[in-house]
Amino acid sequence: MILVFNSISFFDNKKLSLHSVFNGLNTFNSDLDMEDFGSNLKHYRSEKGFSQEAFAKMIGVHVTNLSKYERNKSMPSLEVAEKIATALNMSLDELVYGQQNEKARIRIADNELLNLFNKTQELSDDQKKTVMDLLSAFLLKSNLKQQLG
């Protein structure tokens, strides 16, 4: 599930916390994990070569707050989260969810299956739908067999 958090900026209250957004989204998607935000933030900040002190100054927060965000002890306001994403030169979606290929590699341990999924990206929309329909039918059949037998 990909969401464009930047579209949330239409809210009048920019102090709405990312935590409250997560809580609302978790109603619809149980795969969302707030711990991903902190670990992603730390990973991407370190990858860009920023110290906590320098990065905190860049986004206008105290280093203690940044540390709390990275350890998932606190969640930033949407305004601060947008500043973080901008400073890291990425979308808020990428910051929250991670980059898609990286997430897929983590979740799909079978490299052959992952390669097949990657190849489906080159198919036409109709062909992708056919692959999804086939996969859904196979999984439904497998699930029914498991429940019945």
Image (cartoon, rainbow, N blue to C red):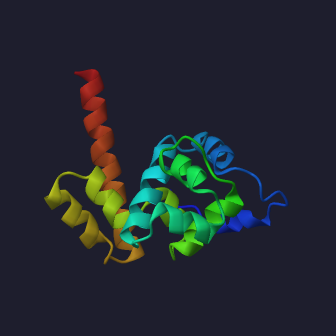
Can you name the residue that lies furthest to the left here? 112
Point out residue 32 in the picture as x, y percentages from the top left corner.
50, 46
- Residue 93 left/right relative to 122: right
Residue in view at x 69 percent, y 67 percent: 7
Q: How many marks?
A: 0
Residue 114 visible in the current orientation: yes
Q: Quadrant of the C terminus?
A: top left
| Residue located at (61% from left, 48% from top) | 75
Residue nearer the viewer, 80 or 140: 80
Give the image quarter of residue 142.
top left
Residue, x 64% and y 53% (percent of image)? 76
Where does residue 144 sit, x and y in percent of width and height?
A: 30, 31
Nearer to me, 3 or 58:
58
Against 121, residue 114 (above or below) is: above
Residue farthest to the right, as pictured: 12
Q: What's the residue at 50%, 52% (across, down)?
A: 37
Q: Would residue 32 be visible to someone looking at this image?
A: no
Residue 93 vs 149, above or below: the answer is below
Q: Quick check: 32 above or below 6?
A: above
Q: Is residue 62 rendered to the left or right of residue 111? A: right
Image-based side of 100 in relation to 110, left or right: right
In the rendered view, tell whether residue 39 sits above or below residue 3.
Answer: above
The image position of residue 11, as x and y in percent, is: 80, 60
2, 34: nearer the viewer: 34
- x and y percentages locating residue 48 in the rendered image: 41, 73
